Amino acid sequence: MTQQPKIGQHLIADFYGASNLDNIENIERALLDAAAAVNAQVLNSQLHKFAGGGGVTGVVLLAESHLSIHTWPEYGYAAFDIFLCGDNNPLPVLEILQLVFTPSHVEQQVLERGRLQDRLLDL
């Protein structure tokens, strides 16, 4: 199989001890600001606030791929998915989200999409 270049970077992040996780307008503004910080072209955004003090789920569809969020304010937890195609760097997006949601702890991993990688298990 011919090796193709990297298609993009997919950053997965978990925020623990985070705040500001239940205001849908602030969350959408944070995602849009983060997209602007990497000069991404926003195609659409769709967010939903769950009733009864629940969290927010949402996605910002980008020409370069997407940003998504799922929040659990009752646990101070948020899960982010930052996928940017080409040479776009997802780290500035993560930095903006950290400023807005002020987590006490962040776990992250970055996957190079579109490039065959050595794996322990082929699914």
Image (cartoon, rainbow, N blue to C red):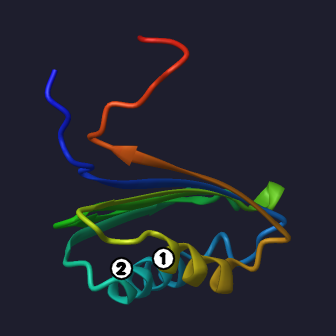
Check whether the beta carbons of the residues at disc 1 and disc 2 lie within 8 A of each other: yes
- The local crowd at label 1, few if under 14, some if 14 to 19, many if 20 or more residues have their Cα within 10 Å, is many
Judged from this view, the residue extending furthest toward the front is: 2
Q: Answer with the quarter of the image where residue 43 lies.
A: bottom left
- Residue under the image location 21 percent in, 70 percent down: 44
Image x and y of residue 97, in percent: 58, 77
Left or right, 69 with reference to 42: right
Disc number for residue 34: none
Determine the secondary structure under disc 2: helix
Q: Tell me the distance, in whole angstroms, between the alpha carbons under discs 1 and 2.
A: 7 Å
Q: Answer with the quarter of the image where residue 98 lies.
A: bottom right
Total labels: the figure holds: 2
- The local crowd at label 2, few if under 14, some if 14 to 19, many if 20 or more residues have their Cα within 10 Å, is many
Determine the secondary structure under disc 1: helix
Residue type at the position of mark 1: Val
> Label 2, on which residue?
35
Image x and y of residue 80, in percent: 54, 58
> Label 1, on which residue?
93
Residue type at the position of mark 2: Ala
Foreground pick, 7 / 37: 7
Image x and y of residue 45, in percent: 29, 69
Quadrant in the picture for the C terminus: top left
